[in-house]
Amino acid sequence: MNNIDVSDWKTPLGYYERAIEELRRAKEELQDELETIKASNVQALESNIKSFQTEIHSLKSELQLTKEKLESAEKTAIEAEKAANEAQAKIQNFKDSLPESTINLQIIEELAQIKGQVSQLCQTNQKSPESDLQKEILESLSSLRSQFYQLEAELTLISPNSGINYSKLRDLLAEHKWQEADKETYLYILRISDREDESWLDDGEIKKLSRHDLRIINNLWLKYSDGKFGFSVQKQIWQDSREDFKRFGDRVGWLTNLVDSEWRRYEKAIFSLDAPAGHFPYTVKIVGLGYRSTSEIPHRLKLFLKRY
């Protein structure tokens, strides 16, 4: 096509040529703008795709970790349930096989081992993801652990020497029934010494008293009196009194009159925590007060307290 002079733009051909030129320039501008938009969008799209890929990878890792934790928790729960059932069965077997007059010390050792395993399982389950199954297992293990403590406490109340079960004394002391507990203590010691008919102990029987039984009795008195009563308390007061039986008797409240050496009648004992320290057990009754000469009391107290 021939070039048209500018002066001819007002002619129909000039208008036509001018319009074509403007359309061409507009088309080029639009193409440039389109290329710019495309380049910008591609960069943003690529950035978004990378971000999404990173997020997806992270989610996959978290999903895999959660899956592994759940598998581990399920495995631990199954093992814990199995161990709990075995422990429950052993507890029942211990209770069923426990003799009335003797105790197998091996039972206590096995019990301690099982209790340790249960405690370890509790700790393992607490670290695992919490679920309804986990909660149920933890409650079961907690209940088992409580039973272990209770059974262990029961076992330690049975003397391997005399075979006596001191649970009755524990119950009386726990209820602060001091008079009943003291009478029970008195009967226990006579039974240990096979002196129930005589109702008091002579020198020979005092020297043969089972230290293990005395420790069980003492520990119970200490525990339920908050350290106020017990043979160990009496022994300390006896030593602090330089083995002066009058001073000792006055401090523990067994003497009503220090000058005249008037001993308190047992019926007038102070059966409460308001009593002086060492007031119970009423050891003077055990060693023969009321059945033998009071002049023998210092000697017998010294013998008795040496056994503890």
Image (spheres, grey):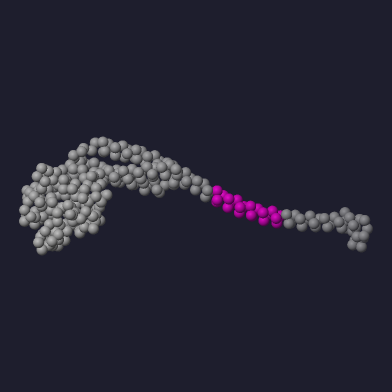
Residue 211 in view of the camera: yes
Q: Position of residue 148 (x, y in %)?
A: 30, 44
Task: Tell me if 32 is positioned left or right of 209 in this view.
Answer: right
Task: Tell me if 54 is positioned left or right of 172 in this view.
Answer: right
Q: Position of residue 53 (x, y in %)?
A: 57, 49
Can residue 55 be found in the magenta stretch? yes
Above or below, 199 against 4 in this view is above
Between 166 and 271, which is closer to the camera in this rendering?
Answer: 271
Q: Residue at x 49, y 48 (%)?
A: 62
Q: Residue at x 14, y 54 (%)?
A: 265
Between 308 and 73, which is closer to the camera in this rendering?
Answer: 308
Identity of the residue furthest to the right in this view:
11
Q: Quadrant of residue 269?
A: bottom left
Q: Quadrant of residue 12?
A: bottom right
Q: Quadrant of residue 69?
A: top left
Q: In the picture, which quadrant includes the N terminus?
A: bottom right
Task: Tell me if 8 is positioned left or right of 151 in this view.
Answer: right
Task: Tell me if 3 is positioned left or right of 146 in this view.
Answer: right
Between 231 and 279, which is closer to the camera in this rendering?
Answer: 279
Bounds of the magenta span? Answer: 35-56
Q: Position of residue 160 (x, y in %)?
A: 18, 43
Q: Position of residue 227 (x, y in %)?
A: 23, 56
* SS majority, magenta: helix
Residue 243 in view of the camera: no
Q: Residue at x 8, y 57 (%)?
A: 298
Above or below, 107 against 227 in this view is above
Between 153 and 20, which is closer to the camera in this rendering?
Answer: 153
Can residue 200 be found in the magenta stretch? no
